[in-house]
């Protein structure tokens, strides 16, 4: 191993031994999740290693390292708070009743058969317009137009009710 490589390795090891616990505490204080905090610390050290030739020349490389960690932790905190995780136990597994009696009545009684079939395939069976087009042996464009028209007719019937 060359002298330069040894110096970089020694510098990295010293930075790790001297600052890793403090970095973890800072990251954990920001994100409130030890697993994510460990990942952030690892990312900070990866950034250090990637830029070690420059960082080794700094008067205060630990300031750079703490700054990188803090920015990454705050970014992660923003992601976590923007999209919070919901425990699986809190998610209802029973099917949600989405049909409204009036809409169902209109679909069964007042809509033409073709419209009823299209809307049933699309919204009750969950088929995509391309799947419906293949089933009805029509083009995808024609299928999309027919679905759009059927939805307009259904909306018009709802307004009349």
Image (tube, rainbow, N blue to C red):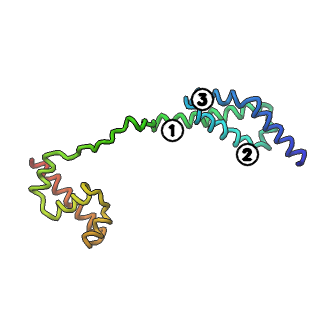
Disc 3 from disc 2: Cα separation: 23 Å
Label 1: which secondary element: helix
Disc 1 and disc 2: Cα gap in Å?
25 Å
> Which residue lies most toward the right here?
3
Percent of width and height locating residue 8:
82, 42
**Nearest to N terminus: mark 3 or mark 2:** 3
Label 3 neighbour load within 10 Å: few <14, some 14-19, many 20+: some
The residue where tag 1 is placed is 79
Callout 2 secondary element? helix
Q: Are marks 1 and 2 in contact (CB under 8 Å)?
A: no
Q: Position of residue 154 (x, y in %)?
A: 16, 54
- Residue 90 lies in quadrant: top left
Q: Secondary structure at mark 3?
A: helix
Name the spot of residue 79 as percent of width and height, x first: 51, 38
Q: CA distance from mark 3 to mark 1?
A: 15 Å
Residue visible at 11% across and 51% down in the picture = 105
Whether residues under marks 3 and 1 lie with C-beta atoms below 8 angstroms apart, the answer is no
In the image, residue 3 above or below residue 146:
above
Q: Residue at x 69, y 28 (%)?
A: 21
Q: Which residue is mark 2?
A: 50
Observer-nearest of 124 and 147: 124
Position of residue 5 relative to residue 154, above or below, is: above
Q: Which residue is mark 3?
A: 28
**How many residues crowd mark 1 within 10 Å: few (<14), some (14–19), many (20+)?**
few
Q: Which mark is residue 22?
A: none
Of 152 and 11, which appears nearest the observer? 11
115 on left or right of 10: left
Nearer to us: label 3 or label 2: 3
Mark 3 or 1 closer to N-term? Answer: 3
């Amino acid at each position: 191993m060359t002298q330069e490589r040894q110096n970089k390795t020694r510098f990295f090891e010293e930075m790790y031994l001297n600052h890793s616990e403090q970095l973890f505490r800072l990251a954990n204080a920001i994100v409130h999740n030890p697993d994510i905090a460990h990942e952030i610390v690892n990312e900070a050290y990866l950034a250090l290693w990637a830029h070690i030739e420059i960082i080794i020349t700094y008067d205060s490389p630990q300031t750079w390292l703490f700054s990188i960690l803090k920015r990454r932790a705050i970014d992660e905190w923003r992601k976590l708070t923007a999209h919070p995780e919901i425990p699986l136990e809190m998610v209802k597994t029973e099917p949600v009743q989405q049909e409204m009696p009036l809409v169902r009545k209109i679909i069964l009684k007042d809509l033409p058969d073709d419209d009823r079939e299209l809307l049933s395939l699309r919204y009750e069976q969950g088929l995509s317009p391309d799947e419906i087009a293949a089933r009805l042996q029509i083009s995808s464009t024609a299928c999309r137009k027919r679905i759009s028209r059927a939805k307009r007719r259904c909306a018009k019937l709802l307004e009349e009710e």
